[in-house]
Amino acid sequence: MKLALVPFAFAGLLALLAPRAEDPKSSGPRVGGGGHTYEWQRGWFQLPTAPEIGNTHGGIEFDAAGRVYITADNDRAMMIFGKDGSYIGSWGEDLGGGVHGICMSSEGTEQRIWLAHARRQEVLECTLAGEVKLRIPWPAESKRYASSEEYIPTAVAIGPAGQVFVADGYGKSWVHQFDRSGAYVRSFGGPGKEPGQFYCPHGLGIDSRGPQPLLIVCDRQNHRLQRFDMQCRLVDVIEGDLRRPSSVQQRGDNLLVADLAGRVTILGRDNQVVGHLCDQPDEAKRGQNEVPREQWMEGEFISPHCARWDEQGNLYVMDWLAQGRLTRLSRVKPSVR
């Protein structure tokens, strides 16, 4: 995998010229380059309590109205923000501490939100208001586990025909498929380094760029992505300049990868690196949870756990940090000449 250095090279200089400590009164630096230029918007999320929101160890999603859904390890397990960053409300008081993976699906004209709950060893399908419609427990039928405690799901993805894929990222490194009713279908992967095996399959995504939809698995501790068809057969392995890929999202021709080791990576249609955003220069801080707030810098990520584009191409990033860190990067549209 070849690194495209030129488009994002100027981002480092911009970051050097920007205020080093995060300041809510600062407009923030521009990062990236070309069609992937963004303006750092620290303070965009108008949190109900400040400055700490608790450990941010989950994900980000959007509904059809553009509202932003954020998971957190507190009694506001699901926090909802408006398109302007205003706080709308929360639900999930009974789910606090363990909501990890999140994705959206459509049920007719209604959207549903899916949650992988690592501490409860289950996946939940909920309405946007938080009503639980389906629970999928640990896959005892798979015969891969002696008990439910060995199963710690970290991600869920919904295929185009309603297939439910669940990654056991913190457990035994299997990915499981269920049908739309929650019935067990199959398991694949398992622990290892060979193609088709996983070492912490942390995140999942659906890739619709090609002639057939593919499931993308963030094989985090093997430092790669792997893609599978809807029958769970390996298609290819994407590796190279990836550190610890934690989440993945496809939008248009691109893949967006949150790399826990201090940066966000964008891959092009050929799965080659287009560039890295906001790379953490201090290796000792990368992928760390306890970095204090006074050491957070504008234009630098620390431990990106989830990254998502909205419909307009703005970028939202959750850093895995004990005090909680959410960042919005506003897309800067190329000037027309």
Image (cartoon, rainbow, N blue to C red):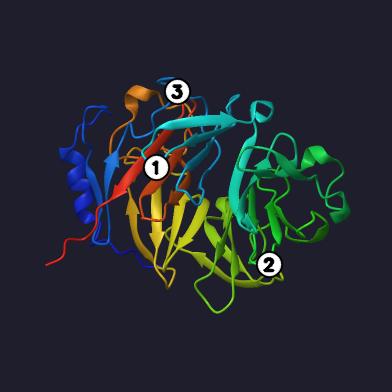
C-alpha distance separating marks 1 and 2: 30 Å
**What secondary structure is found at the residue carrying circle 3?**
loop
Kindly identify the residue that appears in the image at 59 percent across and 50 percent down.
Answer: 103
Callout 1 touching callout 2 (CB < 8 Å): no
* Labels in figure, total: 3
Rendered image quadrant of residue 225: bottom right
Q: Position of residue 99 (x, y in %)?
A: 63, 36
Q: In the figure, 240 relative to 24: above or below?
A: below
Q: Position of residue 65 (x, y in %)?
A: 47, 49
The answer to whether residue 284 of the structure is visible from this angle is no
Q: In the figure, 321 relative to 126: above or below?
A: above
The answer to whether residue 9 of the structure is visible from this angle is yes
Residue 64, numbered label: none
**Which quarter of the image is occupied by the N terminus?**
bottom left
**Which quarter of the image is occupied by the C terminus?**
bottom left
Q: Position of residue 334 (x, y in %)?
A: 21, 61
User: Please, what is the three-letter code of the amino acid marked with disc 3?
Assistant: Pro
Is 172 situated left or right of 282 in this image? right
Residue 48, numbered label: 3
Callout 2 touching callout 3 (CB < 8 Å): no
Between marks 3 and 1 in the image, the one whose residue lies nearer the viewer: 1
The residue at the far bottom in this view is 211
Residue 83, numbered label: 1
